[in-house]
Image (cartoon, rainbow, N blue to C red):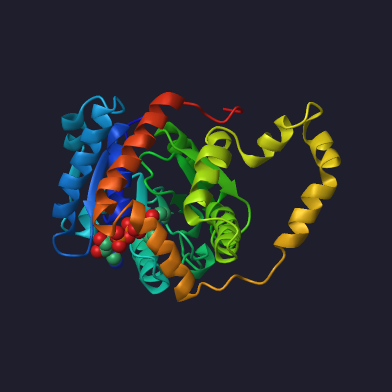
Amino acid sequence: MKKKKIACIGVGNLGRAWAAIFARAGHDVALYDNAAGAVDAALPAIESSLAAMAEAGLVDNVEAAMGRIRASATLADALQGVDHVQESVIEDVEVKHALFRTLDREAPPGAIIASSVSSIPPSEFMANLEGGGRCIVAHPVNPPHLIPVIEVMLGPSTSEETFEACCAFLRGIGQVPVRLNKEIFGYVLNRLQFALIHEALHLVDGGYISAEDIDNVVKYGLGRRWAFMGPFETNHLNATGGITEYYDKFQSAIGGIIAELHREPHPLNPELISRLAEEMESATPVAEVPARQEWRDRQLMALTRHFGDMRPRQE
Ligand SMILES: NC(=O)c1ccc[n+]([C@@H]2O[C@H](COP(=O)([O-])OP(=O)(O)OC[C@H]3O[C@@H](n4cnc5c(N)ncnc54)[C@H](O)[C@@H]3O)[C@@H](O)[C@H]2O)c1
């Protein structure tokens, strides 16, 4: 892939991870953030995540990757000559709305402007832009330098050309784009995640199982298969006649469970949250969360090494 120039706008948790992804893939990256000291704080954090990836064999040359990253004092400087803008500022519709107007005005013609937005529908901040055709949502999962999927959603006037070019670029840097055909609140990954968490809250609150054992069911059960195939492929392989036989054979059990799941939203009451916190903190006290996050990232790096460059089959 031709070397590209990228601007990362907003360099908090997500912007830093994007910078590591772009630089690791060989692209030049300019960092801009409107908070004083934010870019200075981001640089060592990016370096240490690249160093951790190098230790795990996932990055060849940390120094060379860092050499491709530069700090920009102004937005105009960051946008100079860029091919791709990755916006990762706070999740606030007014802030994103104002910023997209500026980005659309100031980014070079032809540059794609992608947002990391995680829940706000793009029509609320990408509407009525002169260059709306080049604006798109590219929503990553935390931490995106170790979890490849990117939910790509078209804005109100995003062109197919932008969609295709953005996905080709994301594939080229090692991510796995998926297409969201229609705007939907919360997007897909979080809707799936919270559908499962909603049921887990109900089960824990109702005394059916502990929070620890819910985690065990997912990590030693569902997650083992879901790490390399999705729920529908799981169904397809659960009967020798494939998914048709599966749904036919287990129709009454599946239908019965689904019927039970149609219930009112489970209240997120303080008693339930403190019960969950008590259980979670007995295993990982809050002071140990940063160390446990490092452990999580090491596990993800080991998984990344294990899977190598496993890609969707059609590619
Ligand atoms: N953290 C996650 O797990 C996660 C996952 C997926 C997507 N996202 C999305 O990514 C975006 C960023 O999230 P984050 O967790 O990195 O937030 P963060 O609070 O860590 O960082 C946001 C950064 O944006 C900067 N900023 C705010 N307004 C700005 C402006 N107008 N111009 C330039 N910089 C500005 C802030 O100074 C801050 O450094 C959000 O839209 C969020 O929903 C976050």
Drawn side of residue 73 relative to residue 23, left or right: left
Please indicate, yes or no, whether residue 244 appears anywhere in the rendered image: yes
Of 172 and 4, nearer the camera is 172
Ligand 1 shows up in which quadrant of the image? Answer: bottom left
Q: Give coordinates of residue 161: x percent, y percent.
A: 54, 44
Image quadrant where one finds the N terminus = top left
* Count of marks overlaid on the render: 0
Q: Give coordinates of residue 190: x percent, y percent.
A: 53, 56
Drawn side of residue 306 relative to residue 76, left or right: right
Image quadrant where one finds the C terminus = top right
Up-down relation of residue 71 to residue 235 (above or below): below
Q: Give coordinates of residue 115: x percent, y percent.
A: 42, 56
Hey, which quadrant is residue 222 in on the image?
A: top right
Q: Residue at x 19, y 65 (%)?
A: 35
Q: Residue at x 38, y 51 (%)?
A: 109
Drawn side of residue 130 relative to residue 13, left or right: right
Drawn side of residue 229 relative to residue 219, left or right: right
Up-down relation of residue 179 to residue 228 (above or below): below
Q: Give coordinates of residue 125: x percent, y percent.
A: 46, 68
Of 89 and 199, nearer the camera is 199
Up-down relation of residue 255 to residue 48 (above or below): below
Of 134 and 280, nearer the camera is 280
Please indicate, yes or no, whether residue 8 appears anywhere in the rendered image: no
